[in-house]
Amino acid sequence: MKFGSKAYEYALMELSRRRGRSKYEYEKRIADIEDRIPEIARLRSELASTSIKLSKVILARNSNTRELIEQMADENLAMQENINNLLIENGYSPDYIKYQYHCDLCEDSGYHNGVRCSCFNTLLKNFSSKELSGASHIKLSSFETFNLGYYSDSFNEDLGIVPRKKMEEILHYCEKYADEFSTESKSICMSGQTGVGKTHLSLSIAKVVISKGFNVIYGSSQDLLRDVEREHFGKSNDDKDALGSLLGCDLLIMDDLGTEFESSFYNSVIYNIINSRLNRGLPTIISTNLSLSELESRYSDRVVSRLMVYDFLRFVGSDIRQIKRFK
């Protein structure tokens, strides 16, 4: 997956911030411990002088150099053990004064064994996700604010269901989906009229998934497809890889499918996104105001056939925004 220079700049700045933060916290812990336990300060000072003593021993090239080096190593181990014991006796963990990295694999350098570390790639992906999702201007919702009271608890003869009971089932499904989310989770198609809670629940899922450390791209189909179009036809000054980000993010949430301008280019991009993510086993959440028959009329058979693999959630009820407006 290709990333733009802005993503690299962001990732490198974040890695630098992490290193600075780790150094600050390490020095703060050391100062605290040496102030509280002076004996540790003395032992650490002795350990620090070891390298000078070792250099002198090696340069002297005496017949007993090896014996002296082994003796110094034993003394160092004994001092380290004394420090650990003093920490434990005073209620601290032996790791308390060890340098703590955000990523132990690359020690916050961003590279491990000459290649980009997974933490670096995560930062790059997260920045690309934020860039694409920034156009939505919608605050993340939560499951706690999803109010079932807006749905009728009377039996609907046309639908053959009780709307509130149906929406309660969908709410529980979405909560479980978010709680158990992985990059192998199933894809979802949320279908229903405007204002019945599709965006609220998809964003509630996003909030939980993001809190677990996954990168999520959210946006309306119109905005996301427009980004891809501008990039494809060279109309964008950005060097981000919009399509690559959509294909490779941990979770893609495409809102309001069917509201985008009808064009062969958009339809091919939609197919590419849906098909590629299915082939990669990556989950996608699509919301639409269109029914299944309307999706079949709007999109090609190959698009609809792939949507059939998704879990379909049929949202029911009245437009909540209208209900709130006239309350």
Image: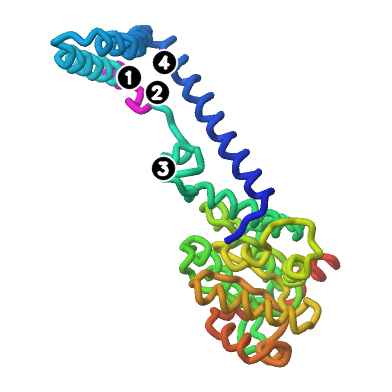
Residue numbers of the magenta segment: 85-95
Does the rendering let one see residue 214? yes
Q: Tell me the amino acid under the disc marked 1.
A: Leu
Q: Which mark is residue 97?
A: 2
The answer to whether the residues at label 4 and label 1 have Cβ atoms under 8 Å apart is: yes
Q: CA distance from mark 2 to mark 4?
A: 8 Å
Which percent across, then down, holds residue 113?
A: 41, 45
Image quadrant for the N terminus?
Answer: bottom right
- Residues 91 and 70: in front is 70
Q: Which mark is residue 315?
A: none
311, above or below 13, in the image: below
146, above or below 292, in the image: above
Q: Which mark is residue 105?
A: 3
Which percent across, then down, holds residue 296?
A: 67, 91
Sequence-first disc among 2 and 3: 2
Image quadrant for the C terminus?
Answer: bottom right
Which percent across, then down, holds residue 286?
A: 64, 74
Sequence-first disc among 3 and 1: 1
- Crowd rating for badge 4 (residues with CA inside 10 Å; few <14, some 14–19, many 20+): some
- Residues 76 and 308: in front is 76
- Crowd rating for badge 3 (residues with CA inside 10 Å; few <14, some 14–19, many 20+): some
Sequence-first disc among 2 and 4: 4
